[in-house]
């Protein structure tokens, strides 16, 4: 048994080194961003299925409460290791993120996964502006082009739907984008002084505390399956935000934003598999524009990083 364990452990380290060891820091950041997007789309699928039958604000609270509880067994080093260096920044991030979540959860049951994800793609525009103004990141022309192309793809998807019965909820979903953008910018700033573990832990704690009053007001006892769904959502959410924080730590935040457009692919597939939501022709056309911009900027960022790093 021990030999078999050592064999698979050696094989895992070998393949991990082949996949991960030869990548540049920027490329690793992009890989973290892709993993984060996939995990958060899986989270959205689980939470949307629950909010169809349970109050959205109670769902918001339970999603983060379960995420907080899921993390506790993996927090090594005791509580001292979780004390942040910037307590004020953690509170600001938690408050801003909670406001964005309240808007997002309000619209969630009324909008399909693919359309919801597409509406969230306005976030990179706010993030790139904020990164240039507040974090002093250099805004290269190709990043702007990739973001604008992706935004054009979003408009192709969203424009035909804004005049329908769900138009109000689409606007509510759009309003959440600048709030999430501000939250992500605060996260990027916090990575200078905090570890990803501390940032994810305090996000879950703050949203849980800020979301508790509304959850109690609308409380209705969840079923066993809903509790299991929230635990699963907690796992997906905690892992997703951990990967996102690792991506922000590894590379410029603006460099990761074009890869968010891949989330539309995951959302369309999950929406079709779980809710039988078939993407419209506008969704498919917009996705092609978005995927093209994503692949283009990913290649340019990888090439730029390899040229900038010194030879071994």
Image (spheres, helix red, strand yellow):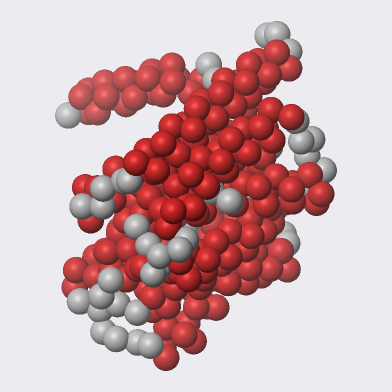
Residue sitting nearer the eye, 216 or 53: 53
Q: Is residue 277 above or below residue 37?
A: below
Q: Residue at x 52, y 69 (%)?
A: 172
Q: How many marks?
A: 0
Q: Image quadrant for the N terminus?
A: top left
Q: Residue at x 70, y 8 (%)?
A: 311
Residue 212 spot, x, y in % from top left? 47, 82
Q: Quadrant of residue 37?
A: top left
Q: Is residue 170 above or below residue 251?
A: below
User: Is 256 left, or right, of 106 in this rendering?
Assistant: right
Residue 21 spot, x, y in % from top left? 51, 20
User: Is 285 left, or right, of 207 in this rendering?
Assistant: left
Q: Is residue 220 above or below residue 175?
A: below
Residue sitting nearer the eye, 98 or 88: 98
Residue 222 spot, x, y in % from top left? 25, 79
Q: Quadrant of residue 287?
A: top left
Q: Residue at x 26, y 84 (%)?
A: 221
Q: Residue at x 32, y 46 (%)?
A: 280
Residue 305 spot, x, y in % from top left? 67, 20
Q: Image quadrant for the C terminus?
A: top right
Outermost residue, bottom side: 217
Outermost residue, top side: 311
User: Is 95 left, or right, of 243 in this rendering?
Assistant: right
**Residue 83 appears in the figure:** no
**Residue 55 appears in the figure:** yes
């Amino acid at each position: 048994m021990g030999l078999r364990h050592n064999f698979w452990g050696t094989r895992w380290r070998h393949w991990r080194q082949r996949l991960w060891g030869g990548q540049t820091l920027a490329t690793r950041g992009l890989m973290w961003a892709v993993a984060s997007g996939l995990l958060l789309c899986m989270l959205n699928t689980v939470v949307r299925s629950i909010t169809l039958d349970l109050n959205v604000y109670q769902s918001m609270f339970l999603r983060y409460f379960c995420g907080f509880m899921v993390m506790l067994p993996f927090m090594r080093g005791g509580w001292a290791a979780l004390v942040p260096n910037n307590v004020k920044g953690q509170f600001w991030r938690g408050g801003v993120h909670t406001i964005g979540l309240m808007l997002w959860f309000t619209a969630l049951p009324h909008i399909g996964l693919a359309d919801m994800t597409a509406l969230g793609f306005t976030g990179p525009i706010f993030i790139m502006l904020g990164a240039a103004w507040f974090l002093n990141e250099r805004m290269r022309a190709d990043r702007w082009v990739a973001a604008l192309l992706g935004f054009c793809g979003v408009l192709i998807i969203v424009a035909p739907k804004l005049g329908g019965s769900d138009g109000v909820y689409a606007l509510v979903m759009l309003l959440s984008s600048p709030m999430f953008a501000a939250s992500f910018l605060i996260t990027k700033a916090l990575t200078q002084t905090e570890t990803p573990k501390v940032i994810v832990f305090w996000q879950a704690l703050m949203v849980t505390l800020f979301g508790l009053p509304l959850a109690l007001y609308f409380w209705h006892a969840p079923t066993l399956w809903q509790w299991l769904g929230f635990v699963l959502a907690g796992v997906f959410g905690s892992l997703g935000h951990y990967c996102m924080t690792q991506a922000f730590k590894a590379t410029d935040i603006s460099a990761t934003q074009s890869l968010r457009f891949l989330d539309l692919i995951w959302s369309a597939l999950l929406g079709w598999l779980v809710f039988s939501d078939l993407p419209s022709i506008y969704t498919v056309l917009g996705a092609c524009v978005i995927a093209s911009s994503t692949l283009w900027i990913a290649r340019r960022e990888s090439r730029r990083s390899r040229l900038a790093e010194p030879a071994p």
